[in-house]
Amino acid sequence: MSSVAVIDYGMGNLHSVAKALEHTGSVDRVIVTSEAERIRSADRVVLPGVGAIRDCMAEIRRLGLDQVVLEVIRNKPFLGVCVGMQALMDFSEENDGTDCLGILPGRVSFFGNSLIDPETGAALKVPHMGWNQVHQEMAHPLWKNIAQDARFYFVHSYYVTPGEDHYLAASTRHGVTFAAALAHENIFAAQFHPEKSQHAGLQLYDNFLRWDGSI
């Protein structure tokens, strides 16, 4: 019986993520939990997230989930979503600077209050909200049956720049070019929301639930 744990630290879009995972039909049990042992016993782990990174990191640490994440991310297929991706980085500019988990090298930066499209000169809205093309920068099992430049749904004011280029799994442009997805060994993380991205998002979740963590 296969299982996936969706980490509950009170800040994520937990139920929409869980429902999307269930909808794929590729997993026997979807467990939304903050209990360390249930997370450890799952076959795969998802770290979702919405909201301010300072509050997210404070709750992750208060519940002791930082240590659980550091443990399970060593040997289980692991997926970070939106702020769950940003939490894996070294540091975020948000909330006057927030230390993150430091699992992947890189930082999280603010788009800015006066974001301009360099090609057209048009003002761009922040937060970046809506559908945008995602350009795959590497071959990866989670891109199976997802077309190059497929559109995914984003909601965020801060974006990730990885510390090393080889972590970049996909890019997107909104005034600046930023990481839409990162990958390293058994870790995959997406800035977009697969659960809000219709067919392509459900395909990515299905791919994750079939993935053994190898590249």
Image: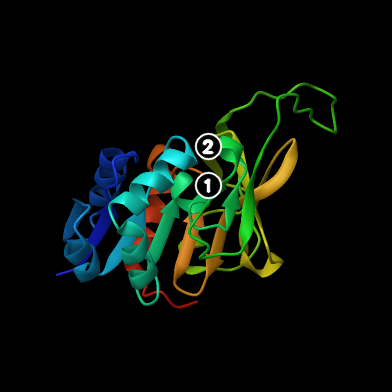
| Residue at the image point whose x is 62% and y is 42% from the top | 93
SS at circle 1 = loop
* Kind of residue sitting beneath label 1: Gln
* Kind of residue sitting beneath label 2: Phe
Q: Which one is earlier in the sequence, the residue at label 2 or at label 1?
A: 2
Residue 212 disc label: none
SS at circle 2 = strand
For disc 1, the marked residue is 191
Residue 154 disc label: 2
| Residue at the image point whose x is 53% and y is 47% from the top | 191
Choose between 171 and 146: the one closer to the eye.
171
The answer to whether the residue labelled 2 contacts the one labelled 1, judged by CB atoms less than 8 Å apart, is yes
Dot 2 alpha-carbon crowd within 10 angstroms: few under 14, some 14 to 19, many 20 or more = many
Rendering quarter of residue 70 = bottom left
Does any portion of residue 91 appear in the rendered image? yes
Choose between 160 and 142: the one closer to the eye.
160
Report the quarter where the N terminus lies: bottom left
Q: Position of residue 87 (x, y in %)?
A: 48, 52
Q: Position of residue 46 (x, y in %)?
A: 34, 56
